[in-house]
Amino acid sequence: MSSIWTDLPGNAVKRLEVEARTGRAVPDATAEAIAADARPDQTSVSAGADAVPADAPDAAEWRRALAGWADTDGPRLTEVQRTFTRRAGIRQPSPGAWGQSLTQRFVADYKPFNFVDGEGVRCSLYVSGCPFRCPGCYNKAAQSFRYGHPYTAELEDRIMADLAQSYVQGLTLVGGEPFLNTDVCLALARRLRHEFGSHKDVWAWSGYTFEQLLEDTADKRELLGMIDVLVDGPFVRALYDSDLAFRGSSNQRIIDVPASLAAGAVRLWKNGQYR
Ligand code: SF4
């Protein structure tokens, strides 16, 4: 029988990738599901166009719109970001959209003992799946919710063992979209808090803004409550700057989450003393 799996050439490569990573043959039924994930009209996948629309705001228009507004001007800033990011070709959810149904509990990668995903030595989990589809996304393959390999109890045990090293400062949740993989990220964050309390910190990157997460579903708010530092918002190619610390475009903020939740408004990490 002809199938989506065999009809699209990229799917064979994906199947081989999954099989190589898991060491197991992918059953046909799973292969069909992965292939369905790869159809361009599915929300759960990667394949969106990578081009910036012709009428997307350029850097000057962005800067004019944001001029005079502090990074902490939540609702107004969020509205500008929503409008502008849509024009920039980035998909934007309404509250509650893209719920838990998208997660496939797949992870693209796990990188222990790295120095780039936040402050100090970190263990980073790259979860799979992100529907924002920012043009210029640094990790386009991981936009698919079926990219990589399934998250396992063995991997979780390994992450906890790595985190136990005294020189490790904390866990980083990145993607893909951690807040659309709360099955994985919440379990891991709860376990970290149970075993290490506040001795290890948690950083996360999200295409959602802090304000969007506050308006969204309970699982997202619970995960937010377990995070120390959030780098928020989608990647905007017009605002790309290679000199920025820990982020790709200047619309993204590095947020001190406990202080922001306590204040009811965004408080920047290190009072914004980062570039
Ligand atoms: S939010 Fe991040 S992972 Fe998602 S599409 Fe944008 S750049 Fe890629």
Image (cartoon, rainbow, N blue to C red):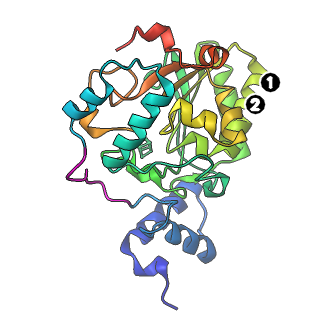
Q: What element carries label 1?
A: helix
Q: In which quarter of the image is the C terminus?
A: top left
Q: Was residue 74 drawn as part of the magenta stretch in this picture?
A: no
| Residue 24 position in % (x across, y down) | 61, 63
Residue 30 figure quarter: bottom right
- The residue singled out by tag 1 in the image is 194
Write down the region rendered in magenta: 48-56
Q: Badge 1: how crowded within 10 Å, few (<14), some, or many (20+)?
A: few
Q: Which mark is residue 190?
A: 2
Residue sitting at 40 percent across and 28 percent down? 252
Magenta segment main secondary structure: loop
Position of residue 234 measured from the top left corner of the image (x, y, whole percent): 41, 38
Q: Are marks 1 and 2 in contact (CB under 8 Å)?
A: yes
Q: Determine if residue 114 is in view.
A: no
Give amino acid for label 2.
Answer: Arg
Query: Image point 65% across, 48% down: which residue?
Result: 151
Q: On the rendering, which quadrant does ligand 1 occupy?
A: top left
